Image: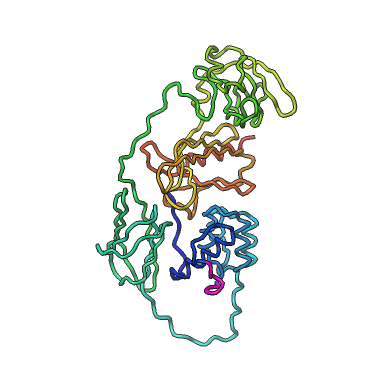
Amino acid sequence: MVGFRTSSLLPRSQRSTRWAVLFCLFGLIVAPGRTNFAQTSGKPLSKQEVIDLLTADLPSSKVGGAARQFGISFQVTTSVEGELRDAGANDSLIKTLKELAPKPANKPETETPVSPPVAGPPILMIQSHPGGAQVYVDDEPVATTSPQGRLKLSQLSPGQHSVRLALSGYQDFEQQVSLTNGQTTKLEASLQSSKAVVQPAPPPSNPEPAAGQSGVRGTLGFLFRKAPEGERGVVVLAVVPGGPAERIGLLPGFVVDSVAGHDLTANPDVMNALSGHPPGDAVEVVFSNGVATLKARAVVAPISIIENLPHFRVVHDHGPPAPNYCMGEMLIVGRSILYEGREATSPSGPSDTVHHLDFQASQIAEARKNAVYMAAQGAFHIRTRNAQNANFILVGPTGRYVRPDPVLSAIAQAMARR
C-alpha cells in the first residue's frame, strides 16, 4: 500500500549505519551494531532522507533537529518544497531547510575549458508497491527491493531489458525498459493482489448510519460518537446543514444527553430512541454546549438527508512498512470531514488498528493530491494547521484505486462553506 521514491545513493552498509543514528536521535530502537555513524559518515541529509523521515511519521520539529545537526545537501526549490510538504513538512521545517541549504559556489572570473565528461553506466531505479519484491532482469534474478520498495541497479548494460517483479500473494509485474549510458531510468511497479477483488455491495435503501448517525426511518441530522468512558451522552461530530439538529442549535463538540426521553448515557442508541418517531414527529432533545444544559424540540426528518451526503470509500495509509493501512468511509457533512476506519491490515496480517479521524474545514491547511508519496496510486493528503498530516487513497466501485478528484472537490466545497 505504501510507496517511496528512490533511496539514498549511499552504499548499503553506510546507509544502514546512517539511518540507525538518525533514528537513535529520535529515541527509536535500532538493531545492535548500527550506531557508529559518527565514525563512518558525517554527510549532510539528502532530500530523500528527509522525505523518508517525514513519511515515517516523525514530527517536523525532530526532522528539523536532525537537519540542523547534520546539515542538508540539497536546495529547497519550489518543486522540492512541494515534495516535502506532501511528506508532511510544516512551514517551520521548510524555513529551517531553506536556511540550511548549501550556498552555491562562486563562479570563478575565468574558467578553464574542460573536456566533456564521459557518460557513466545506465542506472535503473525501481520503486515497488509493496516492498520486498524479487526483481528479475531478462529472466535472471538480480536483487530484492527494500521493505520500502526501493532498489538501485547500476550494473546493467545499455539497451532494452525485460524487468519482472514477483512477490508471494501478488501478480507478477513485467515491463520493458530502455537504458542509456549516463541516464537514470525510473520504474514504478504497483503489484496487484492475486486474491479476487470483491466488489462492495451497494448500500441498502435504509442503511444503518455510519459513525453513530441517528435514525433508520427518520433522523435528527447529526453524527456522533459515544462520549469517553465515565462521561455522559454522545459527542456531536457534525450536523447536516439545514437539518433538525442545526435548527435547534446543535454544533460539533456539543454533548447530547437524551433524545425523546431516551437516556444516551445509559444506552447511546439514537436509532432506538427514534424508532417510534417517523419523519414529522417532534421530539425533545436535551444537550449541553459546555456552559449550560439546554432543551429543545426538533422535528424528525427523513433519513435521506443522511443518505444523500457526499461519502467515499477510502484507504487510510498508516505509513511504512507496507502494507499498513485501514479501510473505511469518508463522509463530508457541512464543514466537517469525517473518516471512520472499519478494517485494517499490517505487515503481519489483519490488524485491530483502525483510525477515526475528524477534520473541521476551518482547521485544514490543504487537501490535495500527492506529488511524490504514493502518487502512482493517486494518493491525496489532508494537512491541518497544527501539522497533522493524513494520507488517503480513493477506492472505486470495483475495489481498485481511482483518481481522488471527486473527494477533493467535495472537501474543497466544505472548506468554502460559510
**Residue 86 in view in this figure:** no
x then y, percent, for residue 161: 28, 65
Residue 298 drawn above or below residue 362: above
Q: Residue 90: horizontal and vertical position, in percent?
A: 61, 54
Magenta segment includes 335: no
State which region is magenta: 35-42
Query: Quick one: which residue is furthest to the right in this view?
Result: 291
229, above or below 3, in the image: above
Q: Which of these two is toward me, 206 or 275?
A: 275
| Residue 337: x %, y % from top left | 56, 37
* Location of residue 279 by image quarter: top right
Residue drawn at point x = 51 percent, y = 67 percent? 18
Residue 303 appears anywhere in the view: yes
In the rendered image, residue 265, in percent from the top left (x then y), is placed at 62, 23
Q: Is residue 255 above or below residue 198?
A: above
Relative side of 294 to 145, left or right: right
Most foreground residue, 62 or 331: 62
In front here: 57 or 247? Answer: 57
Report the residue at 64% width, 24% height from top: 256
Residue visible at 50% across and 17% down?
Answer: 217
The image shows a total of numbered marks equal to 0
Left-right relation of 418 to 372:
right
Q: Is residue 39 magenta?
A: yes
Above or below for 155 versus 202:
below
Whether residue 364 sits left or right of residue 395 in the image: it is right
Place residue 116 in its image quadrant: bottom left
Horizontally, residue 287 falls left or right of residue 281, namely right
Pick the quarter of the image with the C terminus.
Answer: top right
Residue sitting at the far front = 32
